[in-house]
Amino acid sequence: MASPEGAPVPEEQRLGPVLRRQDQVRTGTTDQRLLDSEGPSEWVHTDPWRVMRIQSEFVEGFGALAELGPAVSVFGSARTPRDSKEYDAGVRIGRALVDAGFAVITGGGPGAMEAVNKGANEAGGTSVGLGIELPFEQGMNAYVNLGVDFRYFFVRKTCFVKYARGFVVLPGGLGTLDELFEALTLVQTRKVTRFPIVLFGTSYWSGLVDWLRDTLVAEGKASMHDLELFHLSDDVDEAITLVTKEVGI
């Protein structure tokens, strides 16, 4: 038996922990087989390959954020106009969180997210954006100085929770509600150590809070204690105090 180059093949071959002898000996090297291989590409669309991509997103996200330090995640609408009071409040919240010693994490997009990143960036703090692959959004806003893009929502949401010590939730749409109720559920079920959640904008959130109390709690689908999992505020300074008082740095 000879190799393709004509060199004799050894009777015994060790490849890492694997021992091969006689007709089990392989010719060539692992690098050679990797670089020379050609074939169908359907495997890139299979679930095992997706699992590897999911794993790589966790590795990249954890690696980027592991040394972030104390941080607060801020959620809010991508559709918040720049000339609105909500945008101005987002800028002030981002700035105030940095002044309080926290990095700021948002979804990295436009609107309220941009406002918060802008405030954090202008205050000289760490302004994080955790972006998501969507068919209709503009990508990472210009005020992010540490950004990670994700394919999968659940990986992104894990990073929102894992590296935050509290949440501030500005007025937002379905994505904001998804993030809010994810956080509430994790705290309620004790999947995470309790951390403060502040809903900013009483007039915006009061209808939801009324429904939680008058329907969910009233019909026994939740307890009154669950309404203590979050705070309401219209004041930036109060919101910062509420979201940071339980997580001193």
Image (cartoon, rainbow, N blue to C red):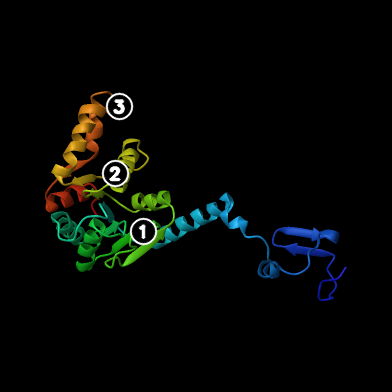
Q: Residue at x 81, y 76 (%)?
A: 5
Left or right? Give the position of 8 relative to 241: right
How many angstroms separate mark 2 from mark 3 (CA)? Answer: 18 Å
Q: Residues within 10 Å of mark 3 (few under 14, many from 20)?
A: few
Please tell me which residue lies in front, 9 or 19: 9
Q: Residue at x 27, y 45 (%)?
A: 195
Disc 2 on helix, strand or loop?
helix
How many angstroms separate mark 3 from mark 1 (CA)? Answer: 34 Å
Q: Residue at x 81, y 73 (%)?
A: 4
Residue 101 in sight from this viewpoint: no
Residue at the spot of label 3: 221
| Residue 131: mark | 1
Q: Compared with residue 30, is residue 18 higher up or lower down, i.e. above or below?
A: above
Q: Quadrant of residue 20?
A: bottom right
| Residue 155: mark | none
Q: Position of residue 200 (x, y in %)?
A: 18, 47
Type of amino acid at the residue the image marks with label 2: Leu
Type of amino acid at the residue the image marks with label 3: Lys
Q: Residues within 10 Å of mark 1 (few under 14, many from 20)?
A: many
Q: Position of residue 163 (x, y in %)?
A: 34, 54
Q: Residues within 10 Å of mark 2 (few under 14, many from 20)?
A: some
Disc 1 on helix, strand or loop?
strand
Q: Earlier in the sequence, mark 2 or mark 3?
A: 2
Q: Earlier in the sequence, mark 3 or mark 1?
A: 1
Count of numbered tags: 3
Disc 3 on helix, strand or loop?
loop
Q: Quadrant of the C terminus?
A: bottom left
Type of amino acid at the residue the image marks with label 1: Gly
Left or right? Give the position of 220 relative to 234: right
Residue at the spot of label 2: 177
